[in-house]
Amino acid sequence: MIKKLLRSVREFKRPTIYTFIAMVGEVVMECLIPFITANLMNQIKAGIEIKALLTTGLTLILMAGVSLMFGGTAGFTSAKAASGFARNLRNDLFEKIQGFSFDNVDKFSSSSLVTRLTTDVTSVQMAFMMCIRTAIRSPLMFIFSIVMAYVMGGKMAMVFVIAVPIIVIGLFTVSRFAMPAFKRVFRKYDKLNETIEENIRGMRVVKGFAKEEYEKEKFKKAAHDICVDFTKAERIVAFNQPIMQVCLYIVMVFTLSFGSYMVISSYGLDLDVGQISAILTYGMQILMSLMMLSFIYVMLSMSLEAMKRICEVLDEESKIVNGENPIQTVRDGSVTFKNVDYKYAQESTKYALEGVNLTIQSGMTVGVIGGTGSSKSTFVQLIPRLYDVTNGEVLVGGENVKNYDLKVLRDSVAMVLQKNQLFSGTIRENLRWGNPNATDEEMVEACEFAQADEFIRAFPEGYDTYIEQGGTNVSGGQKQRLCIARALLKKPKVLILDDSTSAVDTKTDARIRKAFKEYIPETTKIIIAQRIASVLDADMIIVMDNGRVSAYGTHEELLASSEIYREIYEEQTGGKNDAE
């Protein structure tokens, strides 16, 4: 797992190595300064010349400056390395998610993916910075200080043999009890983000039903759950400080008491004041190193859960990938379903689609009618391989969709959904999603056919009108027409409209369908609709019922042969004839 994450370091290996070198230099300087200071104190006691005193003092100042330089360098390089690592990791995650099929996205949920891209990556970034800086400094400081304490104090340093195991056991116990709470927090962040996402997306519904207080309570509960777990974990971790303080004071009391006794009893021959001072300094460094190591242990344990969650995304393989030597051209817009079955999960016993056999000729206009839950959307989503069939095969242009390059296939199939998405940016920028190289004239033409040009020109800024996130500053009908214009600019081989004219009036709907025949006559048009009027003039109408193709044919043929179609027609028209 660590190896997989470290691949994201890439071009930031050099500042990472510089941080390690700078940390070694800083630790060496900080360990030598107490040693020189102790010798200076002994020399002062014995009587030292001013010249030697000044020389030693300047040496200490120089060493402190070098230590500061190393520390500053390490701070700069570690920040650069950690920030760059986080940037690359986020990019790697985002690129991975872009290659996911709908099945993969459904597995994680959008709120969980957002948490992994934000909170989890930030946690791993902090752990990385700590590893290349503090996790290097603390062990080095601990080892060097132990060695120097023995060099300076001899038997006096045995006090650390007692204190260190007590601290290690105490800190390990504290961390062990704190970890489960920290791990739970990351899972609860998903729930919190899900609450926020649902509330913001459904703000109009919330206000329409006056459910603000209910949403506040739901968010408050999610935030409270995180607070409780964090409080519990932090309360346990807070024991680190008292354990450290107790051990520190025990070492100081022992060093001062026993050290003073040795100085007095040996008249400074076995131990001197400078050595006691150095041992106290080294003792402080040893204990602080252990405290930092315990903090690192806690942070790494917290980050471990984030690392696992990130690696779950990086390890996830899209079920929809290109085969060997994929086809780079879609011949035409013909679509064929051969014995197609589909279910959303392999372990599921019920098929969403079952036994679909159908042929649609290129250039045909096909209507799809059926009740809610009859799998109309699933049916059309198999064409651009948003999902892969469980059994059977789907052919576009005479070739199995699995044989095409994914980008080529999806560039040849345009989908307009009932709740299609507009992105932050101008109308012009949104339209160019369909064709980045479209001229202004082509955009205007597409918008005229989609019945969008009139309302666009009514805006003060026209085609440069800024669309807010999600298209919240345009109506549902306007949004649908902009999405249809965007799809028309692609000039696809297959155009799929998934109930995408539900928010426009029947007159505008009829104009749009007429424009399809004029603007893209060779394109296969598949129109999912709830209104019979939207598909009456289709070359073929498909009737879906409970995941099966119940019947298909022209309007007249279905009136005569399909009871389901006839019931829908009579409910919507009151049994009136077409002319009426």
Image: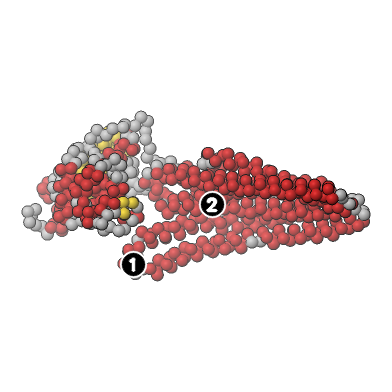
The N terminus lies in quadrant: top right
Q: Which residue is mark 2?
A: 123
Report the number of numbered marks: 2
Q: Amino acid at mark 2?
A: Ser
* Left-right relation of 210 to 255: left
Closer to us: 507 or 344:
507
* Left-right relation of 209 to 123: left
The C terminus lies in quadrant: bottom left
Closer to us: 57 or 468:
57
Q: Which residue is mark 1?
A: 207
Residue 357 visible in the current orientation: no
Give residue 19's quadrant in the image: top right
The answer to the question of whether label 1 and label 2 lie on touching residues, with beta carbons closer than 8 A, is no
Q: Whole-percent x and y of residue 299? A: 59, 53
Residue 38 visible in the current orientation: yes
Q: Amino acid at mark 1?
A: Lys
**Residue drawn where x is 66% and y is 45% of the image:** 70
Q: Whole-percent x and y of residue 191? A: 45, 58
Give residue 488's quadrant in the image: top left
Label 2 crowd bin: few (<14), some (14–19), many (20+), radius 10 Å: many
Label 1: element kind: helix
Depicted 46 relative to depicted 340: above or below: below
Q: Residue furthest top?
A: 325
**Residue drawn where x is 54% and y is 41% of the image:** 12
Q: Whole-percent x and y of residue 294? A: 65, 53
